[in-house]
Image (cartoon, grey):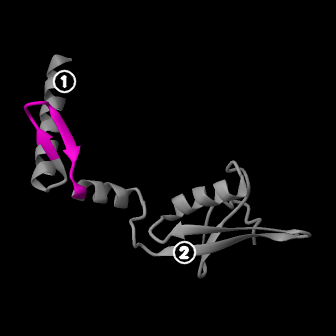
Amino acid sequence: MEFLRGTIDVDVAIAFAALGVLGIVVVDQDNDTAGLTDLGRFAIRRLRGMAEPGDPVLQVRITLKYVDDPPVWRQVLIPAAYPLSRVHRVIQAAMGWEDCHLHAFQIGKTTYGPDPEGELG
């Protein structure tokens, strides 16, 4: 097992050295620590689909079909960089749902979402 730990330590050291060369992390070998640079923080935020100041924001109105007395809707602001998986979580939170309602996203003629029976039409 000690051999495996040594191999993993070497692999981690090589990975951090590469990230350091790319300017993503700063490695402090004396204290055996590493930290993200501004570029690293920016890259992580982008990978996670997080908005940056100045990014476009979409104003979205979510309306339940076939519910009109009274109508049920929410209006939310969603960063344009959010992937559909993140938009899904925003909608779940805005509607107070726990991911148990049938739903789908439709963009043009393409539909995304769990609707195996085709119930949404």
> Which dot, 1 or 2, sits closer to the camera?
2
Q: Residue 46, percent across and down?
A: 35, 61
Furthest residue toward front: 53
Furthest residue toward bottom: 108
Label disc, if present, on residue 120 of the rendered structure:
none
> For the residue labelled by badge 1, is the local secondary structure a helix, a strand or a loop?
helix
For marks 1 and 2, the one nearer the N-term is 1
> For the residue labelled by badge 2, is the local secondary structure a helix, a strand or a loop?
strand
Between marks 1 and 2, how big is the CA–CA gap?
Answer: 47 Å
Give, as a three-letter code, the residue at label 2. Leu
Q: Is residue 31 magenta?
A: yes
Furthest residue toward right: 69
Quarter holding residue 6:
top left
Q: Is residue 81 above or below residue 16?
A: below
| First to last magenta residue range | 26-38
In depth, the one of 30 and 15 nearer the eye is: 30
Q: Residue 31, percent across and down?
A: 12, 30
What residue sits 24% from the left and 54% below the top? Answer: 40
Q: Is residue 39 magenta?
A: no
Which residue is disc 2 drawn over?
58
What residue sits 72% from the left and 52% below the top? Answer: 96
Which residue is disc 1 drawn over?
5
Quarter holding residue 74:
bottom right
Q: Are marks 1 and 2 in contact (CB under 8 Å)?
A: no
